[in-house]
Image: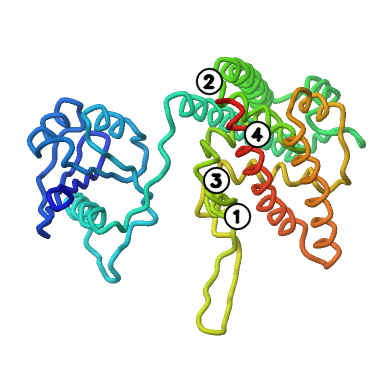
Amino acid sequence: MTTKLRYVGLDVHAETIAVAVAEADGEVRGLGVIPNRPESIGRLMRKLGPAERLRACYEAGPCGYVLYWQLTRLGVRCEVVAPTLIPTKAGDRVKTDRRDAERLARCYRAGDLTAVWVPDAATEALRDLVRAREAAKQDQLRARHRLGKFLLRHGRQPPDGMKTWTRRHRDWLATVRFEALAQQATLVDYRHEVDHAGDRIVRLEGAIDQAVAAAPAALRTVIAALQTLRGIRQVGAVTIVSEVGTLRRFAHPRQLMGYSGTVPREHSSGSAIRRGAITKTGNAHLRRVLIEAAWAYRQGPSCSGALKQRQVGQPEPITAIAWKAQHRLCARYRRLVGRGKPKQHVVTVIARELLGFIWAIGVAAEPLAA
């Protein structure tokens, strides 16, 4: 049966799909371009043969997983592959949709492609919501910077000792006035953008609360368990779950660390071992949450009121892992800082090790939801 398989490479764009097929006998040929429409995809798969004989793949990209689910419903086994891990020939300077589709089909048949994890509908919906909230936070930061730099250019600075973006600071902003009509209009617009971004974040965080409450039991269990860790609250836990998916799909925490892109680069040959900065080849959204959480381990082990509240009702083995994480990561942070390592580098190390505890809690919590 294996010798009769057909490997289909799809170079997907918003309006078109370039198609190529790798036959079992070694022939690789392009089949042209079809519209990116469900009816066209269905006709193509029926033309290529029985669904059980077809193996299709395409690159992960802005078109998402719509094509994956279409092919799956047709009974065709499909994989979404990581674009950065597709082998390329040195010196190849010609790139077309047809050649890209043929390369996908050829590499897929050879087993040289790396498939990415495809989230289910509930996880993907949660991921979209969390990323929308992240975008709102970025917009808020840019809006605040624009307003702050505008005031700085005109010598309008808050009184000494006043922290920015507190209630007192907002009250002070409301008192700032400009004589020139154009500058006053600019100030009002910048203030409006800051307030608008803040309102967006409040709405999205409320939507996250509702989405978590309506999520499947398995997701809710893991999200609650991850919040037993210091530095990880609901938004952080939801981000981890929606970006990683089932933690048990990683056989070892080192695989999860590689997925996050927090492992160091390495270029070694013979007896020479050279390591550099982190690879950053993994999930950037996951990496951001980890770095933010890792800063919490600068302080000594403790259990604040908010953390105690998040740990209420959690099994003792899970809270024990979270408590062990505080002792180990805080001690490691202080040891590395004591050696003179830059704090930013140390926090990256802590974030990588924090993933080990996240993996342990996820593996322990997932069976509880079954």
Q: Amino acid at mark 3?
A: Ala
Q: Which mark is residue 294?
A: none
Mark 3 and mark 4 in contact (Cβ < 8 Å)? Answer: no
Quarter of the image for residue 192 reads top right
Residue at left 20%, top 39%?
A: 17
| Position of residue 352 measured from the top left corner of the image (x, y, whole percent) | 65, 53
46 vs 18, nearest the viewer: 46
Indicate left or right for 196 with 100 as reference.
right
Give the farthest residue toward the bottom: 271
| Position of residue 177 measured from the top left corner of the image (x, y, whole percent) | 77, 23
- Of badges 4 and 3, nearer the viewer stands 4
Instruction: Relative to 212, say whether 156 is above or below.
Output: below
Looking at the image, is mark 3 or mark 2 earlier in the sequence?
2
SS at circle 4: helix
- Of badges 2 and 1, nearer the viewer stands 2
Residue that carries the numbered disc 1 in the rendered image: 262
Q: Amino acid at mark 4?
A: Gly
Residue that carries the numbered disc 2 in the rendered image: 216
Q: Amino acid at mark 2?
A: Pro
Give the farthest residue toward the left: 47
Looking at the image, is mark 2 or mark 1 earlier in the sequence?
2
Instruction: Relative to 114, say whether 224 is above or below.
Output: above
